[in-house]
Image (cartoon, coloured by chain):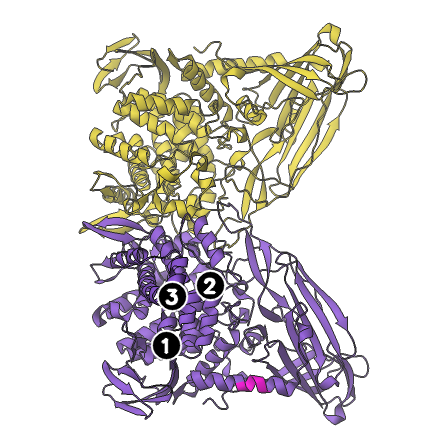
Chain colours: A yellow, B purple
Amino acid sequence: MTKDIKLRLKDVSSSNPGNLEAVFSFGNGHFGVRATNPIESNAVEGTLVNGFFEYSLITYGEAAAYYPKRNETIVSLPNLRKIRVFDDGHGEFTHSKLVDMQLDLSNGKLVEEYELSNDKKQTIKMNVTSAIDQREVHFYGIEYAFEAGTYKGDIYIDKSFVLEEAKAEAGDDIDDPRKTRELKSIKREVVATDDLSQTIAISTAESQQRIEITAYGFNNESPLTKKLALVDEPKVGYGFIVGEKNETGDFAKEDFATIKENSASFWHDTWQNGEVSIAGNDELNLALHYNIFQLNQATGRDGKTNIAAKGLTGPGYEGHTFWDTEMYMIPYFIYTNPEIAKKLLVYRYNTLDFARTRARELGVNQGALFAWRSINGEETSAYYPASTAAYHLDGDIAYAIGNYYQATHDMDFLKNYGFEMLLETARFFREFGTWAKRENKTVFEFHTVTGPDEYTAMVDNNYFTNRMAQNNFNLAYKLGLVLMEEDPEGFSKLGASVEELESFKDIAERIYFPFNDEYQINAQDDTFFSKAIWPFDETPKDKYPLLLHYHPLNIYRYQVNKQADTVLADLLFPETIDDDQLRREFDYYEKITTHDSSLSRSIFSALAARMGDMKKAYSYFSDTVRMDLTDLQGNTEDGLHLANLGGSWLSVVQGFAGMQVTSAGELKIIPHLPIEWDGFEFRIVFNGRLLNINIVDGKTTIKLVDGQPMNIIVNNKSYKLEKATLDILSKGE
Amino acid sequence: MTKDIKLRLKDVSSSNPGNLEAVFSFGNGHFGVRATNPIESNAVEGTLVNGFFEYSLITYGEAAAYYPKRNETIVSLPNLRKIRVFDDGHGEFTHSKLVDMQLDLSNGKLVEEYELSNDKKQTIKMNVTSAIDQREVHFYGIEYAFEAGTYKGDIYIDKSFVLEEAKAEAGDDIDDPRKTRELKSIKREVVATDDLSQTIAISTAESQQRIEITAYGFNNESPLTKKLALVDEPKVGYGFIVGEKNETGDFAKEDFATIKENSASFWHDTWQNGEVSIAGNDELNLALHYNIFQLNQATGRDGKTNIAAKGLTGPGYEGHTFWDTEMYMIPYFIYTNPEIAKKLLVYRYNTLDFARTRARELGVNQGALFAWRSINGEETSAYYPASTAAYHLDGDIAYAIGNYYQATHDMDFLKNYGFEMLLETARFFREFGTWAKRENKTVFEFHTVTGPDEYTAMVDNNYFTNRMAQNNFNLAYKLGLVLMEEDPEGFSKLGASVEELESFKDIAERIYFPFNDEYQINAQDDTFFSKAIWPFDETPKDKYPLLLHYHPLNIYRYQVNKQADTVLADLLFPETIDDDQLRREFDYYEKITTHDSSLSRSIFSALAARMGDMKKAYSYFSDTVRMDLTDLQGNTEDGLHLANLGGSWLSVVQGFAGMQVTSAGELKIIPHLPIEWDGFEFRIVFNGRLLNINIVDGKTTIKLVDGQPMNIIVNNKSYKLEKATLDILSKGE
């Protein structure tokens, strides 16, 4: 298991404070704490609580019917790490030099060293140790240890909250759609205070939410303001309780040891089931562990919250959840911690009423259309060509449901949540699509849609969308039959019938897929190839990402991809494409893909690995796995790229290990080892089993760590997996 | 000529005050005065000055690169017609009953009768006569005549300005895109006042414009406040000077007689050259005259101003100019008053720098893209799918330039304005379009565009757009050759060369036109026919216009037209289509057209007439010509539908008379007389001639009123037209 894997300052290429805040941030699914410098604050400092947002009105230059009326923005709460340190002449140590940071990924502990100075240039040392509780998810602890430097006198510390006003007016333009907006309807107030603790409340005027945060000295011994003698090398520690109104009062204050233990035991369990490691490349191994660490930290675990595009590491994208969850992040949880995957899908289930309403607003009288971007499930996107038009989201959710069920056979989920969502999304697609004639065949089509590639909008028959819809219909049919057998009453209650299931099957079989005869590849959409190719040769490097530098109409009229689109469908449905076509398709679309989206490289890496193109697979992986450590997209300070964190796991497990589940429900791997590595190893939870899979040059070793015997297909040959370790030798890898 | 044609209250179906204000409004191209009730004000009262606007910031829910940053809104100025009337007990006559209104279209005089009452229910009569000066376009005059009713005492009048504050904040959402927004950055102040006059100034903070309005008593005998003895049946008259800062001081105050004379002589001349009348149907004859009257009133005549979508009759569409000018309104002026047509095109020329900048913003490095909606030429549209994407505007302007030149051979225009615009629009299309392969042919295509039909957006190869671009290339080529001959230096100065002209010709010949094989008609775009037809049967009547009731994505995924699109191209380019195909095309597109745009019916009328389908031609014409008198679109109160006013002239002259100019430059008519009419007659100015064309059953009579002999083609036979009247007998009309 993961031991002593630590992220240090030297492992992070940008030392811009905003970047470090995000990279070294803590989270436990309920709330997140950016690793702000405790002395010198930054613009995006603070604490984010999953699901805690405020509404603001959306203003349109020209509005139209059924545009979303209000926005949702995650609320930045006060910085818990802030400390004020004074010398004995009332001077303050306002300057700080960061010496080192060290994030222990094995047990979730952050250690920092600072050198502080006052205006007289006198210095002291401050070491900070912090952890977030991963079990009792309302707790965070931080400990400051001081040592004399050139200053040797007493110091005075102040850990009271600083309640600043919001910085700007709501409704300000955001020119970069990946950032967030400021709010002015947030109230911050101190609600209780005594020597040893202080409680503040933050409430929102429009969404009517309230969060309380209590700061307290550990072990009832540290008041919030205190005099310390440096000769003693003093330590002071504070705990924080972050919860909804009245909730904080329900918790017995924890000491720091408990917080650290709860963190360490959580990470032990998490790595136990979800370990993935690379041998022979420490840098990538560290990055991969880091990504999985942060993916876990960001993920809501209560069925009411989800994963924001930036997790709890920054306010970028306003804290909204996108299709990223189902397509890039849920796979990791399905195969390592399916209970969490279930909670994330239950979150979607809880938004079904919003989704039904939205479908009606789009003129579809049956079924549900989930929100493209939202915190609570209400559609908030103000630019429909790259949001509402991305109807594939319904199919993405269905895809995740299908995979979850296949990997768990969780009948409780199917009965109470899963099938209803499959049914409602299939009903949506059935009414949204249309029958048409193509070369004398009757086919089923989808018009005026936007696929994953947001550099192409409002087209007909986006291949990816059609494929996801087909899968949605197939799943509704197949799992509908299962439910009809297992829970006929529940099945009927949903108004479903065998005739309806057969209507889904019938449509699935006749969905149209555009194909380009000239290149013999799947076509991104009906008209994609009639457009000119983007003038890449004339595009300077500083004009990427294109979306910040070119008018949408300029981008849309060219063949240019922001991210994997048709080839993502190839990755998701390996049985739909042969090797030769995959190669042609990869080559064609790769040339026109900018990877301006952080959701792109991981897919290209995984596909290249599947094709055995290890050079490309390794190169894309190397970029994708270190994306936030190298600030590859240039905006990590707004928060980590959560989908890409999950994407790097996909690259390893579904790419290099070639893991898939066959249509017959069997686990299958086709390992491809990059020559740069000695090997790689990962753990998988699948239908109650825990597997450890180790791949080195020429040999794949599979161990059934826990659970009943099962079959596994390795390189197209089936093996029976029992308690003994299975060694499979292979050639040519 | 038009004599004693009057619009009365009974001719207008809606007596809603806002509607009457617009319908009976005055304008002279420079400013407009809504016919507000002088006693009881309404929400949209006031005065509009052509080109007098204020900027406000556009706020986007999600902005992107090169979205317009600021809006332009025509400024509502104080109501000039307001009068306060008091009884001798300080009671005010605050109630008014409109008895009649009568707008004399022959000389531009408005006469109104009111019965006023005070709170004691005592009444007096007030007759109002007003006129706007059509020669000295800064003047407006109004005269009030009072008679005793149940009240017989003295009255006190007050004609001082009432300077109200603006009503709401800028930036408010407009849910109906056809309305306007309120502004808060307008300053209104009294700058001079004495017994006999008062001058106010209205200035804008952002656009830095200023207008002064002076009110004065006629003949230096009516102070702004005055006591009148009703026994004398008193009359008081006031003039208004409306001009830019300092400008009003430059005018000698006019008396009412001069204003009325200038109005009458203008209308005499206008009808002299532009008469069009229908015999045997007084209602439609009146409506047609009314439309032409209002079209003239709205039109800027100085080369710096244009025609707003609502003219100067209301603040709808914020006072912006659209393609409506070139495609629906300029034709009337080209063939009746080409000097005005020239001024309107010079307005476009004066916006070329904005248009060049806009082209660059759209990623096109050569040429110019004119603003879809604007007052001063700067693009202000906040919804690009139905604005910037309507690239056809460039071709529409080119089309108008071509027609103007063909009808005038105005070399001054070609040298100084026309060719440069043709060149810049052709250059735009050349770089904007792309070469592609279709069935082994190399063709030139245009991608991600929106045609006239705003219920279909961002498609490839919109037939109309491609046809307009082709015409644009052809015109640049042909008129480029003319200019090269006439003004080689000016030609070279524009960077033009014979090689460049040939590049235009080459592209024009290879432009791709989508065609539907199944129906054997021109296809609206590459994918139009793969969409399902809008569920018209399930759409209640109160859900029209669709744009106010359905999300754009809902509308866009169906075959449904807001207005004439492909068939408009058929009307504009009669030589591109044979009768059979036209019939098929008309029938197909008619079925899916909602006419939710006021720009639609006139086109369908004209095309039906050309096909000899007189029933449809008459029916569409009947609707189109009375659109504002019947409040057909339900929003005449926001202002008249200017394009439709011009459209009704198109229906008669280009539809019923079948007038066109052949590619050889010859005038051609193919008359079709509706059986409901005894006949119709119109005048045309063409290359220095003035023709009078009279069509009755079986006979077309053409008189060369003025100018040199010329050829004319009637029903495909060529005639030499000399001073004597030409009678042409025909059958079957």
Secondary structure beneath label 2 = helix
Q: On the image, numbered disc 2 is attached to which residue?
A: B349
Residue at 29% in and 53% down? B445
**Element type where label 3 sits in the image:** loop
Label 1 or label 3, whichever comes before in sequence order: 3
Q: Nearer the viewer, residue A366 or A540?
A: A540
Badge 1: chain ID: B
Q: Amino acid at mark 1?
A: Ser
Region rendered in magenta: B261-265
Instruction: Identify the disc placed on residue B77.
Output: none
Structural distance between the alpha carbons of marks 2 and 1: 28 Å
Q: Please report, as a chain letter, where disc 2 is located.
A: B
Q: Which residue is mark 3?
A: B487
Is A431 on the left or on the right of B193, as rendered?
Answer: left
Residue B388, x across and y down, in percent: 43, 55
* Residue A498 position in % (x across, y down): 28, 42
Q: What's the chain of the residue with tag 3?
A: B
Image coords of residue A730 (percent x, y):
22, 13
Give above or below for A362 relative to A346: below
**Residue type at the position of mark 3:** Asp
Please state the horizontal and vertical placement of residue A231, each as a whole percent of the image: 74, 6
Q: Quadrant of residue A689?
A: top left
User: Which quarter of the picture shows residue A16?
Assistant: top right
- Taking the image as shown, residue A265 lies to the left or right of residue A214, namely left
Mark 1 vs mark 3, CA separation in Å? 38 Å
Residue at 47 percent of width and 34 percent of height? A347
Q: Main secondary structure of the magenta part?
A: helix
